[in-house]
Image (spheres, rainbow, N blue to C red):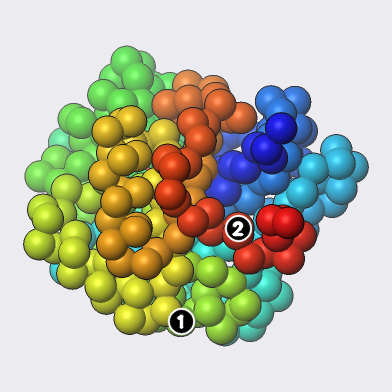
Amino acid sequence: MPLNFDLHAHSNVSDGLLSPADLVAYAAKQGVDVLALTDHDDVSGLAEAQAAAAAHNIAFINGVEISVTWKKRTLHIVGLNIDPDNVALKNALALVRIARDKRAQQMGEGLAKAGIADAYQGAKRIAQQSIITRVHFARYLVEQGLVKDSKSVFKKYLVKGKPGFIEHQWMDLEQAVNLIIQSGGTAVIAHPGRYDLGSVNMLQLLHEFRAYGGVAIEVVTSSHTPPQYQQFAKLAHQFSLKSSQGSDYHGKGLSFMEMGRLADLPAGCVPVWQDWPQFAQT
Ligand code: AMP
Ligand code: MN
Ligand code: MN
Ligand code: MN
């Protein structure tokens, strides 16, 4: 049996529901052999997850998912095998989190104008110690009975043009890729099919990403349809990029799929883990 890789998942250090240890336990139960924890803009769950992975006898990859602004759009860049103690990475992510909190306050103000009071405080309470994301706002609005589910909250309140949406300047693409490389990691474009870039911008993104030292794109992810697996496998080949796969699991009710159930990478893809020493193919 080939190893079951899941290289994209979230804990409650960002917008997932499970603690890092519980997420690892769940992944192990679902048959995942190699798990990467990739919380948004934060590496503070990695030590706990690593210890839990050792206890459950699965392999663990230190990861992160960095929010980036490129051509006025938000992109997500996953770093795999990063060093969670790397000072430059930690400092840069700390700044992202401070800006993220200011953004959340502005989101709260936007929602207040639309008649929804105390959303920042509500989202912060739900987030507890973690960063505040749009998912926490969605959970607050659902909890208050204002909207039926998280998906509808996004549509009605949290996407461009809606009262809780704030234009935000995240990290530059080049800086994110550099930080990942400097901390010993591999940079991967998360769920490229989600960005609605158009083909010219997509080609430009892949070109730039590769020029900065980016290595892989997610081909199989819960954000892609099977035809998109083929589409991005082809683009990966065209740009000599490797391919990654991940569920982007956030927890029950917040995810499009369970863990451990990903399709195989399409034939011809070079897996991002191909030259990782512990998984080197013989
Ligand atoms: P943020 O980084 O605060 O903008 O939050 C982004 C997170 O919101 C993503 O990582 C997803 O977990 C979640 N998300 C984004 N768009 C949607 C959507 N349309 N429906 C449900 N969740 C979403
Ligand atoms: Mn998320
Ligand atoms: Mn993402
Ligand atoms: Mn994600």
Q: Residues within 10 Å of mark 1 (few under 14, many from 20)?
A: some
- Report the amino acid beneath label 2: Trp
> Which residue corresponds to the image point at 44% horizontal and 42% vertical from the top-left?
267
Splitting the image into 4 quarters, where does residue 21 fall?
Answer: top right
Tag 1 secondary structure: helix
Q: Is residue 123 above or below residue 178?
A: above
Question: What's under tag 1, amino acid-wise?
Answer: Asn
The spot of residue 158 in percent (x, y) is 24, 40
For residue 198, side relative to residue 225 (left or right): left
Residue ID at (17%, 48%):
196
Which quadrant of the figure contains the C terminus? Answer: bottom right
Question: How many numbered circles are shown?
Answer: 2
Q: Position of residue 168 (x, y in %)?
A: 25, 63
Q: Confirm if mark 2 falls within 8 A of ligand 4.
A: no
Q: Nearer the viewer, residue 115 or 138?
A: 138
Q: What label does residue 178 carry, if any?
A: 1
Outermost residue, right side: 55
How far apart, in angstroms, are the residues tagged by discs 2 and 1? 20 Å
Residue 29: quarter of image = top right
Quarter of image, res 240: bottom left
| Screen quadrant of the N terminus | top right
The first of marks 2 and 1 along the sequence is 1
Badge 2 vs badge 1, beta-carbon distance below 8 Å: no
The tag on residue 273 is 2
Position of 194 relative to 93 (above/below): above
